[in-house]
């Protein structure tokens, strides 16, 4: 999902310009942990029905969806049907799919007969007349209609976006990451079940064009409507299934690298066409850098698309929403929407969390990908400056891993982006072997591409690759909201003519420890604080930098030691 309000990026730009191009600056900032933690909402039955896996959801595995939707812009409504193609995972006679209660179900049909169903909040329970046996393929069709909710603040607060472009033409789309696909079409609306493929038949009034995920396989016009059929050939998060309606004009760029070959297609409004042809050239370099970091682009058959959208951005698989007004950030050297959302093709779209509790896997890795891009194009010091500014936005009001099974994520708290990225940077510092660290990230990606991953999967990968148990590190950064605080004091004993550094971690788990690099007179040393005071003799100095590689820890000088 789009990372920040634009106004925040204005502040980022100002901060970067203050830092300028000088040597890396050390900001001895005390990243505070507020006394009051985040106040979670009271989770309800509706939250559990959406966010939890129960036997009525785990009893079947969706293999393919076939969507047929007619858009009625004047009424801001839709009429549609969805065919579920699924495999039974165990015997059952009742299953759950999901559809928002404001949308009406006309009928549910299985083998030519209408099925009985009950609705509870956003869940729909259907009863089959026989026991469905394990390991059998089956299908049923849901016919429905209604007015999907309007997005008040897309892409964060999900829903449909009905707008007009500058020339008064219809311009519409949808964003529904947290709200879920059931906001506008019947589906098994849970991160843990991705269909292997999806077919979409979208009927839109002429003369408008409809862009969607995957590749266009057909278009048929009849009765003042055109039906565009798009096909996705890979697993896809259901919240990534999307559409864009507008008077689009397109151009293509062939992409070729040592890893892959596919077509990049760009859909923009006609009055932005010439501007887009120049601005979107950067996309080739961005994709190439990400292939170097992680491996081949995940969706070569379906290609890559950027689609001008009536909202700022969203990582819809192979059809990324773009609404950033064709602007680059000077310190980034790129358009941050193109950069961040393209990173999601690897992190979030290809490697997907099984629960929003682990959404940092999507957003933390995508945000860290921005920093890796800066490092690859501008150097390591620029990478550090980039992360240093991002650290200013960390709130430490809740742990990085969020509550499970309740479909929860508060987009207003950006820690899954920024703390996730800084945690990865800190891990890189601790491992202190870039070849190994990059191998860990690539291995983790390849272990879970076109599939799912959990936070524990990442811990297991790190431990296996390093031969070291990093569980205490991850317990601190995943489950403890506080930022570890390194307390220190420099003391010079005039009588002995010796200098000492006292140090310890506070606001950390008792078993937490990690190496911290310090610079004394431009020479780097390593200390390994624990939660107990330690004392180390060091060279006498007037130049001491604590945490010289900017791991995400708070730093506090104190006279209260030993």
Image (cartoon, rainbow, N blue to C red):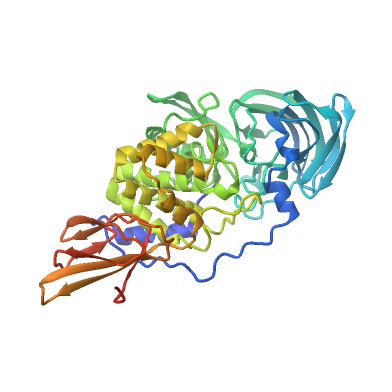
In this rendering, is residue 455 above or below 418?
A: above
Query: Which residue shows up at 34% across the image and 58% down it?
Result: 16
Front residue (pair 3, 491): 491
User: Percent x, y for residue 231?
Assistant: 63, 26
Image quadrant occupied by the C terminus: bottom left
User: Percent x, y for residue 166?
Assistant: 60, 47
Number of callouts: 0
Lateral position of residue 222 relative to residue 191, left or right:
right
Lateral position of residue 249 relative to residue 459, left or right:
right
Instruction: Mark yes or no: residue 186 visible.
Output: no
User: Percent x, y for residue 214?
Assistant: 59, 29
Instruction: Mark yes or no: residue 30 visible.
Output: yes
In this rendering, is residue 84 above or below 327?
A: above
Query: Which residue shows up at 50% across the image and 36% down it?
Result: 345
Lateral position of residue 391 relative to residue 139, left or right:
left
Front residue (pair 142, 282): 142
Q: Which corner quadrant of the image does residue 115 belong to? A: top right
User: Percent x, y for residue 511?
Assistant: 41, 57
In this rendering, is residue 518 above or below 180?
A: below
């Amino acid at each position: 999902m789009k990372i920040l309000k634009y106004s925040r990026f204005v502040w980022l730009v100002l901060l970067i310009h203050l830092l300028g191009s000088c040597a890396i600056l050390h900001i001895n900032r005390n990243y505070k942990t507020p006394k009051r933690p985040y106040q979670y909402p009271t989770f309800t039955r509706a939250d559990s029905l959406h966010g939890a896996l129960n036997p009525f959801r785990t009893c079947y595995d969706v293999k393919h969806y076939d969507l047929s939707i007619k858009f009625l812009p004047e009424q801001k409504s839709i009429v549609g049907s969805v065919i579920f193609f699924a495999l039974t995972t165990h015997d059952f006679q009742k299953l759950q799919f999901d559809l928002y209660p404001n949308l009406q179900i006309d009928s549910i049909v299985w083998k030519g007969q209408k099925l009985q169903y009950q609705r509870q909040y956003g869940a729909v329970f259907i009863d089959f007349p026989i026991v469905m046996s394990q390991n059998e393929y089956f299908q049923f069709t849901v016919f429905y209609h209604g007015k999907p909710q309007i997005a008040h603040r897309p892409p964060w607060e999900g829903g449909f976006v009905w707008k007009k472009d500058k020339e008064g033409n219809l311009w519409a789309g949808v964003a529904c990451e947290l709200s879920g696909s059931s906001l506008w079409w019947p589906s098994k609306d849970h991160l843990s079940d991705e269909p292997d493929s999806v077919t979409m038949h979208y009927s839109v009034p002429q003369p408008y064009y409809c862009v969607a995920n995957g590749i266009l396989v057909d278009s048929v016009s009849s009765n003042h409507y055109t039906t565009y059929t798009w096909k996705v050939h890979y697993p896809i998060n259901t919240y990534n299934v999307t559409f864009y309606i507008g008077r689009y004009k397109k151009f293509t760029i062939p992409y070729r690298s040592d890893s892959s070959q596919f077509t990049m297609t760009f859909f923009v409004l006609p009055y932005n066409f010439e501007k887009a042809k120049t601005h979107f050239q950067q996309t080739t370099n961005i994709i190439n850098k990400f292939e170097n970091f992680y491996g081949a682009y995940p969706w070569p058959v379906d290609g890559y698309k950027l689609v001008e959208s009536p909202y700022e951005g969203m990582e819809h698989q192979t059809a990324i929403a773009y609404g950033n007004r064709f602007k680059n950030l000077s310190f980034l050297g790129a358009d941050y929407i193109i950069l961040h959302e393209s990173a999601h093709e690897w992190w979030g779209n290809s490697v997907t969390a099984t629960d929003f509790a682990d959404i940092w896997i999507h957003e933390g890795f995508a945000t860290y990908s921005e920093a890796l891009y800066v490092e690859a194009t501008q150097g390591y010091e620029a990478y550090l400056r980039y992360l240093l500014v991002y650290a200013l936005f960390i709130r430490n009001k809740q742990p990085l891993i969020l509550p499970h099974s309740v479909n929860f994520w508060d987009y207003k708290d950006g820690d899954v982006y920024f703390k996730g990225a800084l945690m990865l940077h800190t891990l890189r510092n601790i491992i202190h072997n870039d070849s190994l660290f990059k191998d860990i990230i690539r291995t983790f990606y390849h272990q879970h591409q076109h599939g799912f991953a959990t936070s524990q999967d990442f811990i297991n990968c790190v431990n296996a690759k390093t031969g070291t148990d990093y569980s205490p590190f991850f317990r601190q950064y995943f489950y403890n909201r506080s930022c570890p605080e390194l307390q220190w004091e420099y003391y010079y004993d005039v009588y002995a003519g010796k200098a000492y550094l006292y140090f310890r971690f506070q606001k950390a788990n008792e078993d937490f420890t990690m190496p911290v690099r310090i610079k004394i007179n431009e020479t780097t040393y390593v200390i390994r604080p624990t939660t107990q005071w330690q004392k180390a003799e060091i060279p006498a100095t007037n130049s001491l930098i604590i945490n010289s590689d900017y791991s995400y820890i708070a730093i506090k000088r104190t006279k209260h030691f030993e």
